[in-house]
Each structure stands twice: as C-alpha cells, then as structure tokens.
Image (tube, helix red, strand yellow):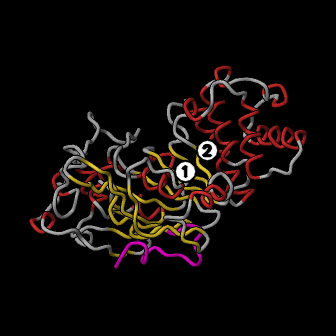
C-alpha cells in the first residue's frame, strides 16, 4: 500500500501521489525524489522535514511547476481534484501566484533590487487582477503590508529591498505570496537566518493566515521546534523518500522510524543531563550512489540484513504511517533517549 492511500483525507486541497523527480547526469538519470505521496487539507499546516538534499524543496517546486530545466517529474499532483502535473504553462500561470503561492527561502534573492517593494507587490496583484485601477492596486498593496506588520506602510511602499532588514524583507515576500488570497501557501524555510524574535513574528503571521483566511500551508524546514509549534501533521523525508508521516503529537511522542527518532534526539534540550549532543552517524547518500533497500540502512543502528535487501512497505500505527521493517518491535522513544 502506498503512503498516499494511507494518509488520504476527504477531498484534500493538494494530493501528491507517486511523485518521482529525475535529474539528468552523465551516466543517465538519477532519482532525486522517489514515489513521494502526501496530502494537505484546507486550513491545515503540513511540515516537511529532513536533511538538505532529502527532496523537500524539489517536491514543492514540482507542485509549483518550477522545476529547473532538464529535471523530469512523473506521478500525480492534484490540486482541488485537478491534475496539474504536466499542465501547460499558460494554465499553470493562472494557478501560480493565484491559487498556489510560495514563500521562497532567501528574501534578498526573491526580491528585485531595482524595483520598489510596493511596485513588486502591485505587480503580483495586477497579474491576476488586470481590471484594478492604480489607486486600488496601491491600496491593496498597503493593506498587505499592514497584514504582515510592516510599520508605516504608506511610506515604506516606495522603499527598496536594501532599505529593509532581513526580517522586514521576509514579511514583504510573505505579502507578495498572499497577495491574491491563495488556497495553498508553500513556505520554504521562512524563518532561516532570522533571530528568534523575528521568527516568532513570522510564525504569528502564518498562524493568522491559516486562522483568518483558511490558507493551507506546506512548511519546508529543518527546525523541528518550529514544526512542533505550528504544524498539524509532519512528513519526514530522507534521500528522496518519506520515512514517516503523521499527526504531529503522535510522531513526536512515539517516533516509529529510526531516522525520525535520531532527528528528535539531536534537538538540544535544557532538561537533558548530557555532555554531548546526540548525532546520527554517517552522512546522507549521494544522488549517484543510493544504497539498495531502505535508504537509511547504512546509518541505522537497528538495521538488519533485510533492510539492505528491499525497501519496506508503509504501515499504519494509529496516527502515524511509517516505512521501516522494525517499526513494530522497536521502542525508539526510549532507545534514542538511552543513546544520548
């Protein structure tokens, strides 16, 4: 059984099934993402967590139809019941920035340095609302700046990106993303390189968007603390595959996959009486040299011979779906605590 079948919810806003993303290489194609599946409901926040190169951002770029040239995606991506994978670019443009929007990881590169911030917000609104007058566009842009807590927005409207701090630029990127009231917002590391105070403000903005406008959010992050405080469900990705997926409380309290348990054990805790932080041994496999069987088996302290022979099927345990041969027998919550 596939993970898309096991985590399905009634009429999901976004439904990804069997997504595969191939990257061309000198010796043929390499699978960067292999058979990923998940769903996101309206008003829900799904956290996508994993090490760099696990396929988090690539998967969501495929949803946006923004994969780099040469990459090839297959499988199924359905938005509001409509298949959008392979949709002609003209039709994707109507969805992109309108019904589906993305907060890109680096606000400095996401913004045009030679255009005022107000002009960049207006451009996004006008693209999907060509009938609005100049005054209406400006007023809407100022409303959006107020929504993301930009002080004195009428004055800030004519300023340039270099005149804003990192946190303020990130708020502008969020304002651009929500300019046309999207149904789905993809947030790619929205709090990276921001201090904790600004992070808290960004989290509050995302929560208000979900609460007041019913926006569904796919949150890409390395920050387990951020996911714990914001997301409803979490999907743990490793080497282009989903290792574990489920309700946030269930996954954090009783991780079923050794990789999930390792990530949780590596989070610093003021209550832990240890001299050294826990670390998962080894490094993720390279794209050109993926191991057979379970991708995590070379780094897994609980691996058995069969783990290197074939990839485990997904199984459900309450509110969690996991791909691990030993998910039933391991008590990872206590085993990783002892390892620390």
Quadrant in which residue 170 is drawn: top right
Magenta region, residue range: 1-15
Residue 161 in the image, given as x and y percentages of width and height: 66, 25
Mark identifier at residue 6: none
Q: What quarter of the picture does the N terminus occupy?
A: bottom left
Q: Is mark 1 on a helix, strand or loop?
A: helix
Residue 10 in the image, given as x and y percentages of width and height: 57, 78
Q: Is 6 inside the magenta-drawn segment?
A: yes
Q: Which residue appears at 66% of the width and 60% of the height?
A: 183
Q: Give the residue number, with chain letter if any, for mark 2.
A: 203
**Relative horizontal placement of residue 306, taking residue 114 as reference (left or right):** left
Q: Which residue lies furthest to the top in this view?
A: 163
The reply to whether the C-beta atoms of the residues labelled 2 and 1 are less than 8 Å apart is: yes
Quadrant in which residue 151 is drawn: top right
Q: Which residue appears at 46% of the width and 59% of the height?
A: 234
**Relative horizontal placement of residue 302, taking residue 93 as reference (left or right):** left
Mark identifier at residue 229: 1
In the rendered view, would you say 235 is above or below 24? below
Q: Is 111 inside the magenta-drawn segment?
A: no
Q: Is mark 2 on a helix, strand or loop?
A: helix
Quadrant in which residue 175 is drawn: top right
């Amino acid at each position: 059984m596939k993970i898309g079948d096991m985590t399905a919810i009634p009429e999901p806003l976004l439904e990804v099934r069997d997504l595969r993303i191939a990257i061309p290489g000198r010796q043929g194609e390499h699978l960067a993402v292999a058979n990923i599946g998940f769903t996101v409901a309206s008003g829900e926040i799904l956290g996508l967590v994993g090490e760099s190169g696990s396929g988090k951002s690539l998967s969501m770029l495929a949803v946006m139809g923004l994969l780099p040239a040469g990459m090839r995606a297959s499988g199924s991506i359905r938005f509001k019941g409509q298949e959008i994978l392979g949709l002609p670019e003209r039709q994707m443009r109507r969805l992109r920035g309108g019904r589906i929007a993305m907060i890109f990881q680096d606000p400095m590169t996401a913004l045009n340095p030679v255009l005022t911030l107000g002009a960049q917000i207006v451009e996004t609104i006008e693209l999907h609302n060509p009938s609005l007058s100049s005054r209406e566009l400006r007023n809407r842009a100022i409303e959006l700046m107020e929504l993301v807590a930009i002080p004195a927005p009428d004055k800030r409207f004519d300023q340039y990106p270099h005149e804003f701090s990192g946190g303020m630029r990130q708020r502008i990127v969020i304002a651009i993303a929500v300019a046309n009231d999207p149904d789905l917002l993809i947030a790619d590391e929205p709090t990276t390189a921001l201090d904790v105070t600004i992070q808290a403000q960004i989290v509050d903005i995302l929560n208000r968007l979900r609460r007041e406008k019913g926006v569904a959010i796919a949150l890409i992050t390395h920050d387990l603390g951020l996911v714990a405080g914001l997301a409803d469900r979490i999907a743990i990705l490793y080497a282009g595959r989903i290792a574990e997926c489920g309700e946030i409380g269930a996954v954090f309290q009783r991780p079923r996959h050794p990789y999930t348990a390792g990530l949780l054990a590596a989070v610093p805790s003021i209550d832990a009486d240890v001299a050294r932080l826990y670390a998962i041994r080894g490094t993720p496999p390279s794209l050109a040299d993926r191991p057979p069987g379970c991708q995590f088996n070379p780094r897994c302290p609980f691996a058995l011979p069969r783990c290197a022979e074939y990839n485990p099927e997904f199984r459900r345990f309450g509110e969690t779906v996991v791909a691990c041969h030993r998910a039933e027998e391991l008590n990872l919550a206590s085993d990783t605590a002892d390892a620390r």
